[in-house]
Image (cartoon, grey):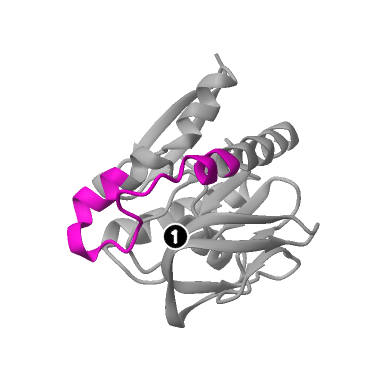
């Protein structure tokens, strides 16, 4: 079976719906816990970067190791699909900027895509990225203009969390307790299904380009 590397940064933020997509496509996910010092060798191998509650341009020592690893992998031509913290790390590596927002963006949020599509997605972030040079803006929200970008066909960054399904939200709410701003006890099945459909199409396109 083909394999795909995935970098996880926090015990409560796993691959979620990405695991469902990978299984349905006959892909084996190799999950590395960067917060535990786990990273694959720097190479041109495609990789998915997840999110996490850390500052992309500061944070713990292991995050600096990941920044160096990512820069080396990009130099070797790696394809990257990056979410939230991952998208910020990718933006920095490609010459962009990350800054603190005036207000955090949390919960279900409507994102508008450049093709006219609109989608309710889950958010939880207080930092935002400015686009790297030559990157193309793909989506925006009312509170955060830079929600998604692509830098060529195989490098993509998303500020929102399409991988968070109902199980992901339950895990995050249990781990972060009252600190979590995510929905509790809501029947969001239709919203999660719409996001998963979008995620499958988007990941299929990225994987085909890889």
Count of labels in the image: 1
Q: Main secondary structure of the magenta part?
A: helix
Q: Position of residue 90 (x, y in %)?
A: 55, 59
Q: Between residue 67 and residue 191, name the one nearer to us.
A: 191
Q: Residue at 31% across / 67% down in the picture?
A: 59
Q: Residue at 75% across / 47% down in the picture?
A: 153
The quarter of the image holding the N terminus is top right
Q: Residue at 25% across / 52% down in the picture?
A: 173
* Magenta-drawn segment: 170-194
Vertical position of residue 131 compared to residue 101: above or below: above
Vertical position of residue 44 compared to residue 126: above or below: above
Say whether residue 37 is visible.
Answer: no
Q: Between residue 119 and residue 97, name the one nearer to us.
A: 119
Outermost bottom residue: 102
Q: Position of residue 5 (x, y in %)?
A: 48, 34
Q: Position of residue 135 (x, y in %)?
A: 72, 64
Position of 41 compared to 63: left or right?
Answer: right
The residue that label 1 is drawn on is: 85
Position of 42 compared to 204: left or right?
Answer: left
* Secondary structure type for disc 1: helix
Q: Between residue 52 and residue 123, name the one nearer to us.
A: 123
Mark 1: few/some/many CA within 10 Å (<14, 14-19, 20+): many
Hey, which quadrant is residue 11 in on the image? top left
| Residue 104 within the segment the image draws in magenta | no
Q: Residue at 42% across / 43% down in the picture?
A: 7
Q: Position of residue 24 (x, y in %)?
A: 56, 20
The quarter of the image holding the C terminus is top right
């Amino acid at each position: 079976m083909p394999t795909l590397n995935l970098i996880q940064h926090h015990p409560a933020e796993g691959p979620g719906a990405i695991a469902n997509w990978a299984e349905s496509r006959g892909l084996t996910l190799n999950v590395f816990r960067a917060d535990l010092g786990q990273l694959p060798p720097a190479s041109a191998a495609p990789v998915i970067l997840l999110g996490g509650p850390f500052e992309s341009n500061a944070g713990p020592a292991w995050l600096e190791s990941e920044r160096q690893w990512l820069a080396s992998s990009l130099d070797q031509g790696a394809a990257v699909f990056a979410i939230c913290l991952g998208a910020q790390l990718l933006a920095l590596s490609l010459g962009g900027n990350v800054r603190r927002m005036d207000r955090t963006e949390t919960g279900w949020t409507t994102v508008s895509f450049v093709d006219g599509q609109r989608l309710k997605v889950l958010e939880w972030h207080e930092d935002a990225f400015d686009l790297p040079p030559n990157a193309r803006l793909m989506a925006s929200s009312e509170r955060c203009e830079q929600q998604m970008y692509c830098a060529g066909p195989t490098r993509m960054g998303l500020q929102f969390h399409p991988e968070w399904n109902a199980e992901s939200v339950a895990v995050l709410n249990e781990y972060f307790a009252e600190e979590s701003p995510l929905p509790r006890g809501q029947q969001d099945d239709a919203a999660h299904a719409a996001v998963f459909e979008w995620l499958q199409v988007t990941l299929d396109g990225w994987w085909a380009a890889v």
